[in-house]
Image: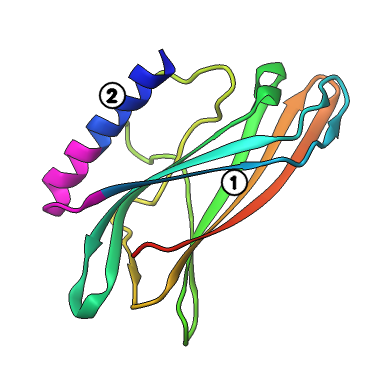
């Protein structure tokens, strides 16, 4: 069921992005953060997985542009309480200042796949936001996850991933 849900979600994301952005390549990046944080009422369940899907297009002068980005986080610990996730996406150029964007929930009604028990609500690149990467720049994703139970809130840790959008 998860595979079908992912395929449908990516199809809708890709179609919407192509219609609004005029093309591009859908890229995916996945990684696991094994923190093994001890959480009261959960045990040692601090690991979480991050899944990022983005529409990456060629920009002027050899740059790359991301006009659509979705971040999903899953953890077995989320089945024991309420998931909390924060994330940022940054442009890290070889030279010059970096730029950081906070990912968030949609501000307008959105069609999303049904959330499953071990997944937090997806986070998105803000509407009308675009990340433009000069040649050789990197995409940096920083994710922090928590789970809230009757015993309190437990941090599952943070994860930082450097991605080559080229």
Task: Provide residue 52's location: percent of width, then percent of height.
Answer: 44, 44
Q: Residues within 10 Å of mark 2 (few under 14, many from 20)?
A: some
Question: Which quarter of the figure has residue 12?
Answer: top left
Question: Which quarter of the figure has residue 36?
Answer: top right
Q: Mark 2 touching mark 1, by CB under 8 A?
A: no
Real-space Cα separation, disc 2 to disc 1, in angstroms: 25 Å
Q: How many numbered marks have been drawn onto this rendered protein structure?
A: 2
**In the image, residue 16 lies in the stretch drawn in magenta:** yes
Q: Is residue 112 visible?
A: no
Q: How is the image coloured?
A: rainbow
Which residue is situated farthest in the top direction here?
1
SS at circle 1: strand
* Between 24 and 152, the one nearer to me in the picture: 24
> Which segment did they paint magenta?
14-25
**In the image, residue 22 lies in the stretch drawn in magenta:** yes
Task: Provide residue 70's location: percent of width, then percent of height.
Answer: 40, 43
Relative to 128, does residue 122 appear above or below in the rendering? above
Sequence-wise first label, 2 or 1: 2
Q: Is residue 66 visible?
A: yes
Residue at the (55%, 26%) spot, across then down: 119
Residue at the (65%, 51%) spot, across then down: 159
Task: Provide residue 58's location: percent of width, then percent of height.
Answer: 21, 65
Residue at the (23%, 51%) spot, across then down: 25
Question: Which quarter of the figure has residue 133?
Answer: bottom left
Query: What residue is shown with label 2?
Result: 8
Task: Provide residue 20's location: percent of width, then percent of height.
Answer: 15, 48
SS at circle 2: helix
Tag on residue 86? 1
Relative to 52, does residue 92 appear above or below in the rendering? below
Tag on residue 148? none
């Amino acid at each position: 069921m998860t595979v079908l849900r992912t395929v449908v979600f990516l199809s809708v994301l890709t179609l919407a992005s192509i219609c609004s952005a005029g093309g591009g390549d859908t890229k995916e990046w996945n990684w696991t953060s094994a923190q093994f944080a001890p959480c009261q009422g959960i045990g040692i369940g601090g690991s979480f997985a991050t899944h990022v899907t983005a529409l990456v297009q060629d920009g002027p002068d050899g740059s790359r542009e991301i006009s659509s980005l979705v971040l999903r986080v899953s953890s077995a610990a989320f089945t024991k309480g309420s998931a909390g996730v924060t994330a940022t996406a940054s442009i890290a150029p070889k030279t010059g200042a970096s730029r950081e964007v906070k990912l968030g929930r949609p501000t307008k009604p959105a069609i999303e796949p049904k959330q499953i028990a071990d997944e937090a609500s997806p986070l998105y690149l803000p509407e009308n936001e675009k990340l433009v990467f000069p040649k050789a720049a990197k995409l940096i994703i920083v994710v922090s996850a928590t789970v809230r139970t009757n015993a309190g809130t437990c941090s599952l840790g943070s994860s930082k991933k450097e991605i080559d959008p080229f």
